[in-house]
Image (tube, rainbow, N blue to C red):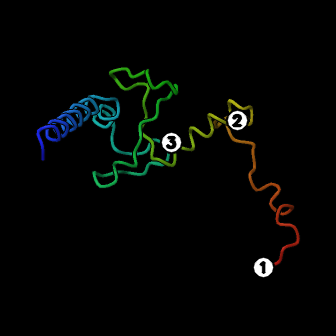
Amino acid sequence: MSTKDTSKLDRIVADARRNADARSEGYRERALKIYPWVCGRCARTFTVANLRELTVHHRDHNHDNNPPDGSNWELLCLYCHDNEHQRQAEAQAGRSVQTPRGEIATHSPFANLKAMLGDKKP
């Protein structure tokens, strides 16, 4: 390996270490230290083995709002986090209804399924 190749590799490794240090100071790592490793919606528990499936949700949907006390965060599993953002998107599009238990989606993806399938027999 030439000197040029070695210096490029050294820069890549240094950048990777610097990025890892920055991430360790990031809001995800802080949230994982503050809160128990449990989804705030479905109560699924997490261990080191599956921790990558636990996400940090910003309650106000502003990823720049990261107070030190974590008051804008909640830990959600991938599925509940995706569901939360889908509900937000539907609410912004005007396709949700406010109920005493929160907003519910009014879109029904299978409403026209019978017509789409027609008279097809298996």
Specify the amino acid type for callout 3: His
| Marks 3 & 2, CB-CB < 8 Å contact | no
Who is closer to the viewer here, 87 or 22?
22
| Secondary structure found at label 1 | loop
In this image, 5 relative to 27: left or right? Answer: left
| Marks 3 & 1, CB-CB < 8 Å contact | no
Residue denoted by label 2: 99
Give the quarter of the figure containing the C terminus.
bottom right
Specify the amino acid type for callout 1: Pro
Image coordinates of residue 48 in percent, x first then y, are: 27, 51
Residue denoted by label 3: 81
- Residue that appears at 72% across and 36% down: 96
Image coordinates of residue 50 in percent, x first then y, are: 34, 53
Up/down of 61 relative to 35, above or below: above
- Residue that appears at 57% across and 44% down: 83
Image coordinates of residue 117 in percent, x first then y, are: 82, 66
- How far is mark 2 from mark 1, CA to CA? 40 Å
Mark 3 or mark 2: which comes first in sequence?
3
Who is closer to the viewer here, 27 or 39?
27
Q: Which mark identifies residue 122?
A: 1
Tally of marks = 3
Up/down of 77 relative to 87, above or below: below
Mark 3 or mark 1: which comes first in sequence?
3
Front disc: 3 or 2? 3
Image coordinates of residue 114 in percent, x first then y, are: 84, 63
| Secondary structure found at label 3 | helix
